[in-house]
């Protein structure tokens, strides 16, 4: 299998692995992308960038992971360009990879993805920015939580951000998180014996995200 070529010293494997990225079988393409990521050779960057548009989702993920491992300036630039792709899945995976590259230009590009046409891509960009300690992502998630339509998803994403990056987030933004109270999620529910579904507001538990923010503010000696 192509994965067997994935040893750091096996630089001669780059050419056949790049060729395998064009194989008709998704399993072969996925394995080749994985192996190239293990090798970490920048010569494979252009070919791996093309996998972000592969018709098979598992190949796209493998390609993004490989670019994350290589992590050079060229791979970052190619991933930024992918954010303009017409393929929602490619844009989503590009955000995933850019979050690992941690290049300043990559962070700026992630901020533009907050205006993406896809809700899933916007959400992923916001969470990724938040994990990088960028207040724009956290504030976007707070606004979404207060909007009621996707409050539960926003608070869940905030929880992952706060768990990972609380210490990197500025105090003003943490104060906004600490004040996340009375958040509700709009959803349909059947009341009593009435079979008619009615739109109701259900409370969303923000205890955990607020706790992260409050503890960090206390550590800094900043009032919530």
Image (cartoon, rainbow, N blue to C red):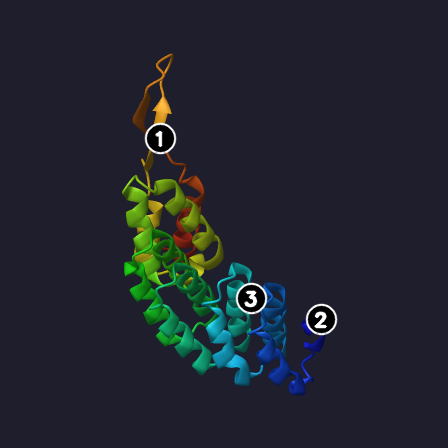
**Does label 3 or label 2 sit earlier along the sequence?**
2
Give how far across and how far down residue 80 sits, in percent. 37, 73
* Rendered view: 79 above or below 217: below
Give how far across and how far down residue 10 sits, in percent. 69, 84
Q: Secondary structure at mark 2?
A: loop
Q: Residue at x 42, y 40 (%)?
A: 207
**Does label 2 or label 1 sit earlier along the sequence?**
2
Q: Nearer the viewer, residue 77 or 207?
A: 77
Disc marking residue 62: 3
* Rendered view: 44 above or below 2: below
Residue named by callout 1? 202
Residue named by callout 2? 1
Q: Nearer the viewer, residue 204 or 26?
A: 26
Q: Residue at x 35, y 41 (%)?
A: 151
Disc marking residue 182: none
Cα–Cα gap, marks 1 and 3: 38 Å
Residue 222 in sight here? no
- Say which of marks 3 and 2 sits in front: 2
**Does label 1 or label 3 sit earlier along the sequence?**
3
The quarter of the picture where residue 76 lies is bottom left
Q: Secondary structure at mark 3?
A: helix
Q: Residue at x 38, y 53 (%)?
A: 120
Cα–Cα gap, marks 3 and 2: 16 Å
Please report contact status of discs 2 and 1: CB closer than 8 Å, yes or no. Answer: no
Pointer 3 local density, CA inside 10 Å: few below 14, some 14–19, many at least 20: many
Give how far across and how far down residue 130 sits, in percent. 39, 59
Q: Secondary structure at mark 1?
A: strand
Please report contact status of discs 3 and 2: CB closer than 8 Å, yes or no. Answer: no
- Say which of marks 1 and 3 sits in front: 3
Cα–Cα gap, marks 2 and 1: 51 Å
Pointer 1 local density, CA inside 10 Å: few below 14, some 14–19, many at least 20: some
Return the residue found at the far top: 193
């Amino acid at each position: 299998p192509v994965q067997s070529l994935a040893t750091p010293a096996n630089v001669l494997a780059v050419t056949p692995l790049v060729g395998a990225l064009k194989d008709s079988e998704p399993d072969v393409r996925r394995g080749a992308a994985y192996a190239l990521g293990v090798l970490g050779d920048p010569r494979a960057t252009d070919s791996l960038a093309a996998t972000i548009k592969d018709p098979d989702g598992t190949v796209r993920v493998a390609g993004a992971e490989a670019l994350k491992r290589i992590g050079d300036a060229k791979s970052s630039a190619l991933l930024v360009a992918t954010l303009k792709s017409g393929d929602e899945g490619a844009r989503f995976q590009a955000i995933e990879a850019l979050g690992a590259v941690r290049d300043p230009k990559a962070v700026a590009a992630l901020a533009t993805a907050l205006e993406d046409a896809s809700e899933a891509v916007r959400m992923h960009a916001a969470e990724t920015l938040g994990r990088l300690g960028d207040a724009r992502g956290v504030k976007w998630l707070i606004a979404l939580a207060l909007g009621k339509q996707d409050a539960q998803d926003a608070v869940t994403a905030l929880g992952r951000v706060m768990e990972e990056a609380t210490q990197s987030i500025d105090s003003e933004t943490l104060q906004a998180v600490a004040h996340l109270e009375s958040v509700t999620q709009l959803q349909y529910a059947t009341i009593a014996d009435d079979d008619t579904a009615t739109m109701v507001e259900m409370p969303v538990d923000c205890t955990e995200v607020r706790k992260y923010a409050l503890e960090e503010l206390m550590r800094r000696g900043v009032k919530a």
